[in-house]
Amino acid sequence: MPSTHFLIIAMSQNSGRPPRPEDTGIDETIRRSLDQYFKTLDGQRPHALYDMVIQAVERPLLDYVLAQYQGNISHAASALGLTRNTLRKKLAHHQRSPAAISQRRAPHSA
């Protein structure tokens, strides 16, 4: 599985620790998106920026991880570092269904 392969390489390059967001490119992607967002504000002040970013990141993260584990809540929760109950609450908040997500294949999954 390519994502596991990446994690093993990243951990070996990072003294056995999981990679930090800034080591994976995620950090830079978020920074570029925020730069673009502030440019579109045209001098206006942002409102509820934190919630907007968390929503934008959390929804695809949940979808992706659930698809990786074919909708298995226990495995997805473990991978995310959440309890199953917390994952269920987050899915309900985002109006996501594990069954519907499991029908999709995650990109790069075997």
Image (spheres, grey):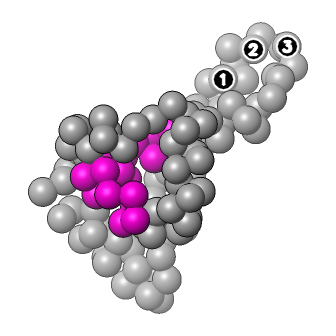
Q: Between disc 1 and disc 3, whose residue precedes?
A: 1
- What residue appears at the point 59 percent right and 47 percent down from the top-left corner? 89
Q: Which mark is residue 100?
A: none
Crowd tier of the residue under label 1, counting other residues whose Cα lies within 10 Å: few below 14, some 14–19, many 20 or above: few
Which residue is more in the foreground, 40 or 50?
50
Are the residues at dot 2 and dot 1 in contact (C-beta closer than 8 Å)?
yes
Q: Position of residue 66 (x, y in %)?
A: 35, 50
Q: Position of residue 10 (x, y in %)?
A: 38, 74
Q: Quadrant of the N terminus?
A: bottom left
Q: Which residues are magenta?
A: 59-76
Say above or below: 36 vs 65: above
Q: Position of residue 94 (x, y in %)?
A: 55, 34
Please state which amino acid type lies under the numbered disc 3: Gln
Q: Is residue 73 left or right of residue 30?
A: left
3D distance between C-alphas at marks 2 and 3? 5 Å
Residue designated by label 1 = 37
- What residue appears at the point 37 percent right and 53 percent down from the top-left corner? 65
Question: Helix or strand or loop: what does disc 3 sit on?
Answer: loop
Which residue is more in the foreground, 8 or 92?
92
Question: Helix or strand or loop: what does disc 1 sit on?
Answer: helix
3D distance between C-alphas at marks 1 and 3? 11 Å
Dominant secondary structure (helix, strand or loop) of the stretch shown in magenta: helix
Residue extending farthest left? 110
Hey, which quadrant is residue 24 in on the image?
Answer: bottom left
Residue designated by label 2 = 41
Residue designated by label 3 = 44
- What residue appears at the point 87 percent right and 19 percent down from the top-left corner? 45
- What residue appears at the point 68 percent right and 31 percent down from the top-left corner? 52
Please state which amino acid type lies under the numbered disc 2: Leu
Are the residues at dot 2 and dot 3 in contact (C-beta closer than 8 Å)?
yes
